[in-house]
Image (cartoon, rainbow, N blue to C red):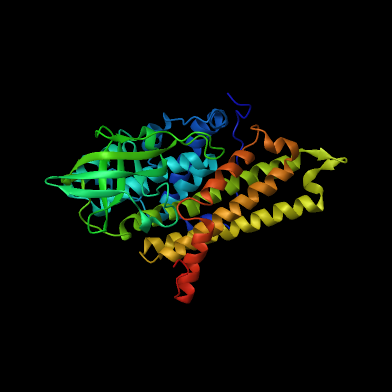
Amino acid sequence: MSMRQEDRYTAHDYYLIDELLEDDHLLARQAIRDWVKQSVSPIIEDYANKAECPTHLFKELAEIGAFGPSLPVEYGGGGMDEIAYGIIMQELERGDSGIRSMASVQGSLVMYPIFAFGTEEQKRKYLPKLGSGEFIGCFGLTEPNHGSNPGGMETTIRDDGDSLILNGAKMWITNSPVADIAVVWAKNEEGKIRGLIVEKDAPGFTAPEIHGKWSLRASITGELVFQDVRIPKTQLLPNVEGLKGPFSCLNKARYGIAWGAVGAALDCYDSALRYAKEREQFGRPLAGFQLTQKKLAEMITEITKAQLLVWRLGTLANKGKATPAQISMAKRNNVHMALEIAREARQIHGGMGITNEYPVMRHMMNLETVLTYEGTHDIHLLITGHDITGLSAFV
């Protein structure tokens, strides 16, 4: 057990944004917050320190409705709106970015594509089990040679009668070593990108774990390796082709990340504010010094701006109006904001800030990954640039 037994977190809402939320949003948030305090905070430092994933939390995440909160109930989701989904991600990431990743991948990158692009048979077969945590899923897009340029993917499928033969490799895949199924994107013989559901017991399919991470240490990450894996054609997602498929999934996940990063920032700010009030130097609390107040005031200002950004984004998402470029802007801004706040919070904690008695250094390391996954900081900037100029800087 780590030293950090007690979770003393208090929420911060400087602009009274809660008044813009509905009762079911607030109830969902409280349920997740209570669960994080009970099931995540007491153990997370220990798991991160050991670089182990608390896989027993998959079932608990299902029980609290964290898998696909905005998908229909009949398909294993929560039947809630997009703001509820965002709020749930925010509370999970307040606990740990890796825990939010476990839920994000399951709901947005596995359940969502099966729901949006799958057959009725595929939905009935997989979604209830994913929603209940009986199945764990992962999402295979990024490759060893192709990160920001998924269009260059080398993973292929070729037709072989009533089957497809899958070859290639995917890299940096959350949940892959423990996943029961993988939603994999590959190029067919015409060079078109297709999605398919691969079950873990398929011969020739392996998912080795990636070790040596300084970031997201409580999240399990691996590869997906396919060597002449025979996949029945019934496993193909029939209702999409091209990059539109994986990108629509990423937009759902990036939306959740934009909310989630606010949670990490809030945890760092909350810890820094409490520490600054309690820690005395030169005969008074740190919070009484101008430079400390400057740090704290700037933190809550940036958090408030980010809270307003995701609230508005959620409102647009509920109307079906949130554009990919708007989602990119919020993801990029909020993750960068959270990382800056983690760094400032670490300074306020002084030497104690690098220990696992406080959550700040763990959040800071986690956010280094969040900054570049599901679209790097720079790529999201270029997405905004393309949107406002009409000119692509990618080619």
The residue positioned 54% from the left and 27% from the top of the image is 50
Pick whichever, 392 or 14, lies toward us: 392
**In the drawing, does residue 180 fall left or right of residue 383?**
left
Pick whichever, 67 or 356, lies toward us: 356
Q: Quadrant of residue 323?
A: bottom left
**In the drawing, does residue 14 fall left or right of residue 209?**
right
Where is residue 265 shown, x and y percent of the image? 59, 48
Where is residue 48 shown, x and y percent of the image? 55, 32
Q: Quadrant of residue 105?
A: top left
Q: Where 82 sits versus 32, above or below?
A: below
Quadrant placement of the C terminus: bottom left
The residue positioned 25% from the left and 58% from the top of the image is 240
Total labels drawn: 0
Quadrant placement of the N terminus: top right
The residue lying furthest to the right in this view is 282
The residue positioned 49% from the left and 67% from the top of the image is 384
Q: Quadrant of residue 300?
A: bottom right
Residue 26 visible to an observer of this rendering: no
**In the drawing, does residue 7 fall left or right of residue 225?**
right
The residue lying furthest to the top in this view is 1
Q: Where 262 sits versus 173, above or below?
A: below
The residue positioned 36% from the left and 35% from the top of the image is 207
Where is residue 383 shown, x and y percent of the image? 47, 65
